[in-house]
Amino acid sequence: MMTIALKHAVRFADFNLDIETEIPAQGITGVFGASGSGKTTLLRCIAGLEQSAPHDRTPVHRRRIGFVFQQPQLFLHMSVRKNIEYGLHRNAKSGPAIDDIAAMLDINNLLDRAPRSLSGGEAQRVSIARVLCQSPRLILMDEPLSAVDERRRNDVLPYLDRLHTESAVPIIYVSHNIDEICRLSDHLLVLDDGKVVAEGELQQVLAMTNLPQLAGQNAGAVVSAVQAEYDVHDDLTAFDFPGGRLWVTGRYASSKVRLRVRASDVSLSLSKAESSTILNILPAEIRRIETESAATLLVSLQLGEAGLVARITRRSSQALNLRIGDRVFAQIKSVTVRR
């Protein structure tokens, strides 16, 4: 598999970035970490906006890198179409057809509008369209949804899904939102204090619950699943994954999805409940038990070839006398369907 080498070191008065790694030259690589961990600085280094690699003197305008910023950077005196066409002016070769890109991002009806009339989500989709017209070799996205509200974010995410599916251009996606990262990313870098503290395939990295960045409210797992059936009477959809079957409320068009299961939505039992409101109760094996706080533990579970994480209290663990290797039942209260 082809890779992209990242080797960047910059020194500021109160912060140092020192990163040397490789990421896949395909799909979406998520960059996750707390504010101040170096996520945006890394993107600026890759784009050439920060001098971080003395051997790399390539001018910014010749790097063929598209950059989508937190706030849409549109020319207010131009129409949406003219803004997108501006991307073509930076493309030495004949770029993709504007109408094709507009169709993919569902902005055909916006082309004659002025940027001031757009919602935050619409403006960001226009920014992405302009970047695509540059025919970049790499796209950088710096928290592109942080400036839009929850409803608008949910409006834009399906188009990022489509970009992931239909575009062959690798993307580096920065976010402090773990749900966005889990929905979009194939590969994951976790940053802390300017350094990479974890990297690898998404599910593999999410299993590293000993990392503070992946504990607390961020603790959980993602599994790939295939739609098996839909119960029209109860409006429930069944998804099969390597650990069994999960029922989720609602109907879904996609046959293949990612299921995000938060650790706080998983409880454990030594026996399978015969009368319970919880629909998803699956056999599992305890693989790891880690202290999260004075009161709580994170329990890593194996379900066939899939992994889940459960957050339980220390008191509950003692009451059940849980040990590594024990067979238990994972009771999954809620599942979020992604893509």
Image (cartoon, rainbow, N blue to C red):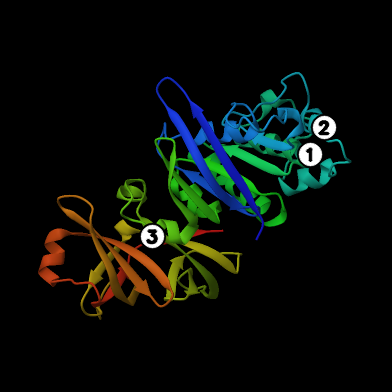
Tell me the residue at 15%/50% (across/down).
294
- State the image coordinates of residue 183 (x, y, percent, origin top left): 52, 54
- Mark 3, residue position: 207
Examine the image and state in which quarter residue 323 appears. Answer: bottom left
Q: Earlier in the sequence, mark 3 or mark 2?
A: 2
- State the image coordinates of residue 160 (x, y, percent, origin top left): 62, 48
- State the image coordinates of residue 57 (x, y, percent, origin top left): 69, 29
Tell me the residue at 75%/29% (across/down).
61
**Which of the two discs, 3 and 1, sits closer to the camera?**
3
The numbered disc on residue 186 is none
Measure how far apart labels 3 and 1 are at the Cα level.
37 Å
Measure how far apart labels 2 and 1 are at the Cα level.
7 Å
- State the image coordinates of residue 90 (x, y, percent, origin top left): 81, 31
Examine the image and state in which quarter residue 75 appears. Answer: top right
Measure how far apart labels 3 and 2 are at the Cα level.
43 Å
The residue sitting at the right extreme is 94
Image quarter hosting the N terminus: bottom right
Amino acid type shown at disc 2: Glu
Q: Earlier in the sequence, mark 2 or mark 1?
A: 2
**Left or right of residue 138, residue 317 in this image:** left
- Mark 2, residue position: 85
Amino acid type shown at disc 1: Cys
Amino acid type shown at disc 3: Ala
Residue 166: in sight, yes or no? yes
